[in-house]
Amino acid sequence: MKFRIITNNPLVNERYENKFLIDYHKDITFLKTLEVVREKVHLGYEILTHPLTGSIKPGETPFKSIIISEKPSTLNFDSLELIENAIMTTRKFPLKLGWTDKILGDFKLIDCDIITSGIESINQNN
């Protein structure tokens, strides 16, 4: 299955930009990344990895990567409900600021590891 990755994580972009379709959005928040995915869902893209994967709460990390279908089809109501719920949940957690470069690097790596697992899972199921 072909797919695209929506991300605000420069590490994910760097690691996968020549392997997969990447919609890289530099300097946007976790919440804005979810809103970009919602826009794609409205166009008919399907969400293939959960928008709130991992054990880090929204607001505790600035980075998010989500896999969606490569091309749009018809509106997928399951994807729409999933992204709307993720956005509502994220809005409940205020974004923390003031992270050191080391902590930001750790958050980038965690998000990259999570999306790598998603890629592996999608590839194994096809």
Image (cartoon, rainbow, N blue to C red):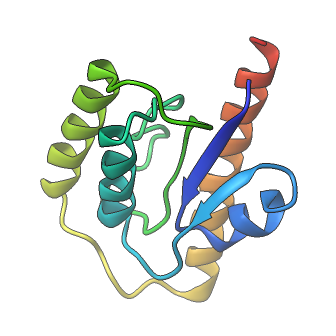
Residue 44's spot in the image, x, y percent? 39, 34
Residue 68's spot in the image, x, y percent? 54, 37
Judged left or right of residue 56, residue 88 is left
Judged left or right of residue 73, residue 96 is left
Task: Tell me if residue 118 comes above or below residue 32 in the rendering.
Answer: above
Residue drawn 70% across the image and 61% down it: 12
- List the single residue furthest toward the right: 18
Where residue 114 sits, quadrant-wise, is: top right
Judged left or right of residue 16, residue 109 is left
Task: Tell me if residue 75 comes above or below residue 91 in the rendering.
Answer: above
Q: Name the residue nearer the viewer: 68 or 59.
A: 68
Total numbered circles: 0
Q: Name the residue nearer the viewer: 19 or 12.
A: 19
For the C terminus, the quadrant is top right
For the N terminus, the quadrant is top right
Residue drawn 79% across the image and 62% down it: 17
Residue 37's spot in the image, x, y percent? 39, 49
Residue drawn 29% across the image and 74% down it: 96
Task: Tell me if residue 26 comes above or below residue 33 in the rendering.
Answer: below
Residue 124's spot in the image, x, y percent? 81, 16
Q: Name the residue nearer the viewer: 97 or 20.
A: 20
Task: Tell me if residue 120 comes above or below residue 105 in the rendering.
Answer: above
